[in-house]
Amino acid sequence: MFTAEIISIGDELTSGALVDTNSAYLSRELAELGMPVLCHTTVGDDRAAMRRQFRTSLSRSDLVLITGGLGPTEDDLTRQAAAEAAGVDLVQDLSAMRRIRCLFEIRGRVMPASNEIQSFFPRGARVIDNPHGTAPGFELEVSRGASVPGAGRAKALVFPGVPAELREMWEGSGRALSLDWQEQMTGRRSVTVARVLRTFGAGESDVESRLPHLIARGREPRVGITASQGVISLRITSQGEDAALCRRLVDETAGVIYEKLGDLVYGEGDDTLASVVSEKLAVAGKRLAVLEWGTRGYLAQQIPPAVFAGGLVDSGEGLIPKTLGLAADSPLEEVLRAWQKMTGAEAVAAVGPFPAGEEETLREKFPVPVAALLDGGYREASYPYGFHPAIVKPVFAARAFDLLRRLLF
């Protein structure tokens, strides 16, 4: 089986000063290509440790993706360690050197002498262009047996650690290079087709119970289930050599999910409840205003300017009813209708107050009202407060958007 692994380089990662987002991104990309990731490894800026890890990884995996350590400073040692691991020396690529100089000239800067090291690569390596950075990457094929233990061949693809540069380089050439290498090693080029369905309104176990046969291990296509901020995502993936067959299998499974879950499914791919509702309102030529107590402006941040009609945030001291000329104990529907009239918005969404000191663990249930108004239609619900502070705002915002979605559809 063709396997891959990922190595991230940098003291800033091993110390915890920065979070390694590159490995997560590349793992998702490799999964799309049907390349299982054997492991993630993070190594500090230690040349000997890097050399040992490169040899270990190249001895057990067909493809090794390495990010970081390609800068011009003394602690950027990836190219040197890669050359030592492969048992070769470093050689300069004059074309890469000219391009690096050109980038500095375009930016109106004189290139420091230290940047010249970025044009050196292990002998036999091929340069991977970096369109917007001074650190080119490289691909290095290794024959196991001498410097690297084992038999057969392995390949390393090495990228800079800057996430934006890595992603651009992966899209531009890294993905194709990985697929080409897989085909060389296995004699086949697999195709992966995937769809992600987003659901809201039921918990992970509830959703899974409605789709028991779909989540089973070993099923084709595979259906993975994940939860984040109240949204349950179902990722359908099919891998094979026949793209049309993969698409058919994925679409058939998606149809079953839609049938079983109904309006729990609100969108696909990058859709959020806010984006789905906003798009629907925009198509209908309607605008949305918000009233917020507990979410403190989070709702408003999710709405695009073209749809947004205004928002009020209450500090907990009765600001919203007072602003609208209402009594402090006015029913929530009355408050929403008053705000609708004042803003001229066709739609209003609201999240009520959270408990005081909501960062602390509550000792008893505390109901939080959520409401939505669309033209003359109105919906209101109450949910117990009880989420971790890190996700409570997104969850209650999603509940407000979901009420509005159900009025729209």
Image (cartoon, rainbow, N blue to C red):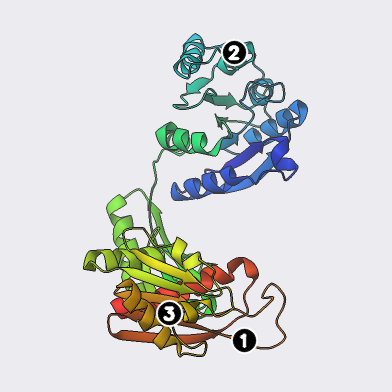
For residue 374, above or below residue 312: below
Which residue matches tag 2?
Answer: 116
Query: Closer to the camera: disc 3 or disc 2?
Result: 3
Amino acid type at circle 1 is Phe
Q: Earlier in the sequence, mark 1 or mark 2?
A: 2
Front residue of this view, candidates 89 and 268: 268
Q: CA distance from mark 1 to mark 2?
A: 63 Å
- Place residue 338 in its image quadrant: bottom left
Give coordinates of residue 323: x percent, y percent.
46, 77
Q: Mark 1 touching mark 2, by CB under 8 A? A: no
Which residue matches tag 1?
Answer: 366
Q: Earlier in the sequence, mark 3 or mark 2?
A: 2
Q: Residues within 10 Å of mark 1 (few under 14, many from 20)?
A: some
| Residue drawn at (64%, 14%) of the image | 114
Q: Mark 1 touching mark 3, by CB under 8 A? A: no
Helix, strand or loop at mark 3: loop
Give coordinates of residue 289: x percent, y percent.
38, 70
Amino acid type at circle 2 is Glu
Which residue is the extreme one toward the left?
Answer: 284
Helix, strand or loop at mark 2: helix
| Residue drawn at (39%, 59%) of the image | 269
- Place residue 325 in its image quadrant: bottom left
Q: CA distance from mark 3 to mark 2?
A: 65 Å
Give coordinates of residue 155: x percent, y percent.
55, 30
Which residue matches tag 3?
Answer: 324
Query: Closer to the camera: disc 1 or disc 2?
Result: 1
